[in-house]
Image (cartoon, rainbow, N blue to C red):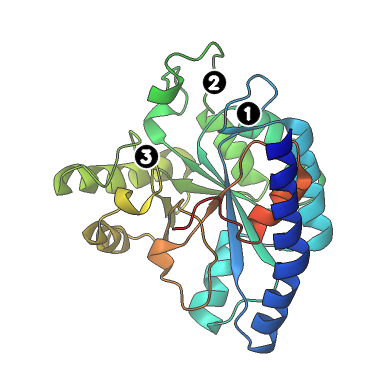
Amino acid sequence: MLRKVIKEILFFCFYYLYTPIRNTIKKLSKNNFATIIMYHRINDLDDNTMTVDTAMFSRQIEFLKNKYRVISLNQLLKEILEHEKIRSKSVVITFDDGYKDNFTNAFPILKRYNIPAIFFVTTSFIGTDRKFPWDENSKVKFKNMTWEDLKNLLAQGYEIGSHTVNHIDFGKCAYDEACFEIKQSRKDLEKHLEVKVKYFSVPFGKKQNLKNEFKYLMRDSGYKCCLTGYGGLNYASTDVFELKRISIPRTTSLLCFKAYLEGFKRHPQ
């Protein structure tokens, strides 16, 4: 209980005391930033750190709708690459892996509030019963989205991006394997969905999970950007092949979400 109280005090101080001052300074200096947030699963079946329950997700999306400017990844790239300027309070919502609950649970909530998002999927899992390694011993059976689910998301205006074919670690794999994962996943998506795929997100997402030469490989393979997962805020000067994302933790505290949204870090990078 004491630990929880201390956390809430830290969140309060960060969000209500530090954040307004920092954001005012950045706005005056015309150095606004965008926050890209990352989800994996949205369900009420488990209490894993990768999962946000549906009620809390709905509260988070409602808060974003009322307090922030939620834009598509395409819009953010346009502002960075064409205008070299980001409007204040900009947020992009992303999902990784391709879990079925992204379609059954997250999508209806996003649609209700007319909020854009992008879904990065691991193509060899789509339309199959294949499990991610970290789910092998789970008591809950997590389903994957189907190609029809992805087509429905596209039809509703949502974006789809690549998250490799097999969810490999780019920090450990050889160049040839990375080349296959980057290029084949794009081919898979474009074949099944009949759209150009321009966006990529790195599995595992830490700094050690992405070698510099693979960023150039993504660019040369036709992608417009690459998203990581090690936290941080994005400015007009940020390398679009190393865009930072903040992973949203499972929490019962909306204040925790607010703090993470503004760049709160549990551990210094």
| Residue matched to label 1 | 101
> Is disc 3 placed on a helix, strand or loop?
helix
Say whether disc 3 or disc 2 marks the residue closer to the N-terminus: 2
Q: Nearer the viewer, mark 3 or mark 2?
A: 2
> Is disc 1 placed on a helix, strand or loop?
helix
- On the image, the x and y values in percent for residue 159 come to 57, 50
- The residues bearing labels 1 and 3 have C-alpha atoms spaced at a distance of 22 Å
Quick check: marks 3 and 2 in contact, CB under 8 Å?
no
Residue pictured at 63% horizontal, 20% vertical: 46
Quick check: marks 2 and 1 in contact, CB under 8 Å?
yes
Say whether disc 1 or disc 3 marks the residue closer to the N-terminus: 1
Residue pictured at 33% horizontal, 33% vertical: 166
Residue 10 can be seen, yes or no: yes
Q: Nearer the viewer, mark 1 or mark 3?
A: 1
Quarter of the view holding residue 214: bottom left
Residue pictured at 55% horizontal, 37% vertical: 40
Residue pictured at 77% horizontal, 45% vertical: 254
Q: Check disc 2 and give the amino acid type.
A: Lys
Q: Check disc 3 and give the amino acid type.
A: Asp
Q: Residues within 10 Å of mark 3 (few under 14, many from 20)?
A: some
> Is disc 2 placed on a helix, strand or loop?
loop
- The residues bearing labels 3 and 2 have C-alpha atoms spaced at a distance of 20 Å
Residue 143 marker: 2
Horizontal relation, residue 27 to residue 211: left or right: right
| Residue matched to label 3 | 188
Depth check, front residue: 242 or 126 = 242
